[in-house]
Image (cartoon, helix red, strand yellow):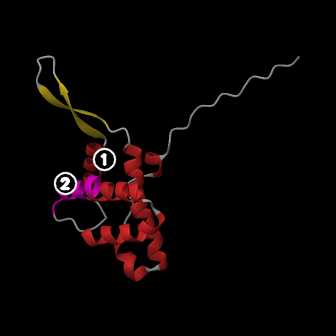
Amino acid sequence: MRDLLIDYLRERQPSLDFASLDAVSRTLAGLFWARVEALAPGIDTLRLPPQVVRAWKDELATVERTTISPSGDRVKVPVPRLNLKDELIRVRALYLDIAHWAVEDPTRWASWVAPCPITDAEVQKADRQTTQPVIRGR
C-alpha cells in the first residue's frame, strides 16, 4: 500500500502545488490508510470491509481537543471535524483517479481498483437556499 500511495502522489504531483500535495499526502497516509490499518491490521487492498469503512468514518468525523474542565484539569473532548468533507473528497479522489487511470494503463492500476467507500452524497456541498427578489407589479 505504501508503494501505491507513493505512485499515486507522484502521478498527481505535476497538477498540484506544494500545499495541496502536502494536504493530499497527509490525508491519504495519515487520516486514511494509517487508521484503516489500525482498524484492520494486515489489510493490503483498497477494497475495505463495510465495518472498517463505518469505523473509519466515525473516527474521522471528530478530532480531540484539549480543554480545561471546571475543576482545572486538562481533558480531551471530541469535537466535530470542520473540514470533514475536504478529507473525504481527497480519499474519494484516490479511488476515482485509480479507476480512471486503470482504463488507460491497466497493467499499472487495474489491480488496485475497488468500490469507493465514500458516496457522492457524502461529499456534496450543502445547497444554499437562495431567495429570489419579489417583483411586484406597479
Res 105 visible:
yes
The residue carrying mark 1 is 57
Mark on residue 38?
Answer: none
Determine the residue positioned at 20% across, 27% down. Answer: 67
Q: Secondary structure at mark 2?
A: helix
Name the main secondary structure of what is drawn in magenta.
helix
Check the image and name the residue furthest to the right: 138
- 90 relative to 43 in the view: left or right: right
Mark yes or no: residue 50 visible.
no
Q: Is residue 29 magenta?
A: no
Ranked by sequence position, the earlier of labels 2 and 1 is 2
Whole-percent x and y of residue 72? 12, 20
Q: How many marks?
A: 2
Q: Residue at x 66, y 27 (%)?
A: 131
Horizontal relation, residue 77 to residue 6: left or right = left
Which residue is found at the position 32% from the left and 54% from the top? 27
Label annotation for residue 39 = 2
Q: Secondary structure at mark 1?
A: helix
Kindly indicate the quadrant of the structure image that contains residue 8: bottom left
Q: Outermost residue toward the bottom?
A: 107
Magenta region, residue range? 30-41
Indicate the amino acid at tag 2: Leu
Side of 84 where 32 appears, left or right: left
